[in-house]
């Protein structure tokens, strides 16, 4: 299948690690032109180095900052003359005490995973209109469809699915599709790095980190394993491809069978 992504200008946020890095790599293999944003500049530099041969622009961007997002989008448009695809992927997660979950962190997570995708989509819309074509994918989560016990995360990822739906209705008139991917647990640094989900799960279960991570997959995921980041990237790339352009407003589970609902 020809995905029609050759020379498409693709923005990926949170591209220094995990799913974002795999997404960038998958687009590079399709001949797309990449504009990668992250707060982790060293990580972006490493991704750019690994993608030698591809056209890649990197910028240190904190997507929670309005001015930084604006400057980034202007820089990408100036550098490549157009913007075709936006992948809103930057994010994080935190388990927490349901009675004491800090409001400050809830607000920070909303800035990162809810307002930033809205802001970046709004900033890209004029460019999509100019092209007469565009495509957006938001990295939501299955925990936007069913609770996973992460208060801010579940709430915000559910909002991401609704944001996807609303923008898909609005953007259809000018030939832009807007979809979400809903990964189940994915084997990325978000589970393994110090203080991240693996440590949080170990604390909650009393198990050792690796044991807790393994136990979670075996007891919750029908396929019995975490997704590889590349498996999420494949879905993202397909949804923004030419053959998938009529698909819009979808929140596609990529979860080894974990979501049980019919929608
Ligand atoms: P990750 O920690 O490997 O990567 C997240 C990236 O986002 C990092 O490079 C980080 O530096 C970047 N980032 C964080 N804050 C930022 C900011 N303010 N501005 C710019 N960049 C910022 O995590 P991942 O697992 O690859 O997660 C990517 C996305 O996938 C997130 O939205 C996450 O919620 C979602 N997701 C992950 C899983 C999973 O199990 N790993 C499951 C479902 C959804």
Image (cartoon, helix red, strand yellow):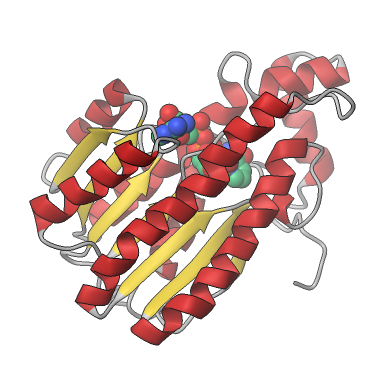
Pick whichever, 2 or 72, lies toward us.
72
Point out the residue furthest to the front here. Answer: 67
Q: Is residue 236 left or right of residue 104?
A: left
Residue in view at x 19 percent, y 59 percent: 31
Residue 7 can be seen in this image: yes
Residue in view at x 32 percent, y 72 percent: 134
Residue in view at x 54 percent, y 62 percent: 180
Name the image quarter holding the C terminus. bottom right
- Residue 106, image x, y percentages: 68, 33
Pick whichever, 141 or 256, lies toward us.
141
Q: Is residue 188 left or right of residue 83?
A: right
The image quadrant that residue 96 belongs to is top right
Residue in view at x 52 percent, y 47 percent: 115
Q: Is residue 43 left or right of residue 147?
A: left
- Residue 28, image x, y percentages: 24, 52
Q: Is residue 262 above or below residue 114?
A: below
The image quadrant that residue 256 belongs to is bottom right
Q: Is residue 95 above or below residue 70?
A: above
Pick whichever, 186 or 140, lies toward us.
140
Pick whichever, 242 or 71, lies toward us.
71
Residue 224 can be seen in this image: no
Name the image quarter holding the N terminus. bottom left
Q: Is residue 126 above or below residue 64?
A: below
């Amino acid at each position: 299948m020809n995905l029609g992504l050759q020379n498409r200008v693709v923005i990926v946020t949170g591209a220094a690690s995990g799913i974002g890095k795999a997404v960038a790599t998958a687009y590079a293999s399709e001949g797309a032109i990449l504009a990668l944003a992250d707060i982790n500049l060293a990580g972006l530099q490493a991704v750019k180095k690994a993608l030698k041969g591809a056209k890649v622009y990197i910028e240190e961007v904190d997507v929670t900052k309005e001015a930084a997002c604006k400057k980034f989008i202007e820089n990408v448009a100036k550098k490549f003359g157009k913007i075709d695809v936006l992948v809103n992927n930057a994010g994080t997660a935190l388990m927490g005490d349901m009675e004491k979950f800090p409001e400050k962190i809830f607000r920070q997570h909303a800035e990162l995973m809810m307002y930033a995708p809205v802001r970046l989509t709004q900033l890209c819309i004029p460019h999509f209109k100019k092209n007469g074509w565009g495509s957006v994918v938001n990295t939501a989560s299955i925990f936007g469809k069913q609770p996973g016990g992460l208060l801010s995360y579940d709430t915000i990822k559910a909002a991401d699915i609704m944001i996807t739906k609303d923008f898909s209705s609005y953007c259809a008139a000018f030939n832009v599709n807007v979809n979400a991917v809903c990964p189940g647990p994915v084997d990325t640094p978000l589970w393994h790095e110090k203080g991240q989900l693996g440590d949080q799960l170990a604390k909650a279960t009393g198990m050792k980190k690796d044991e807790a991570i393994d136990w979670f997959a075996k007891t919750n995921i029908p396929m019995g394993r975490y997704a590889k980041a590349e498996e999420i990237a494949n879905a993202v790339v397909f949804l923004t491809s030419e053959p998938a352009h009529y698909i819009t407003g979808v929140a596609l589970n990529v979860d080894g069978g974990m979501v049980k609902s019919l929608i």
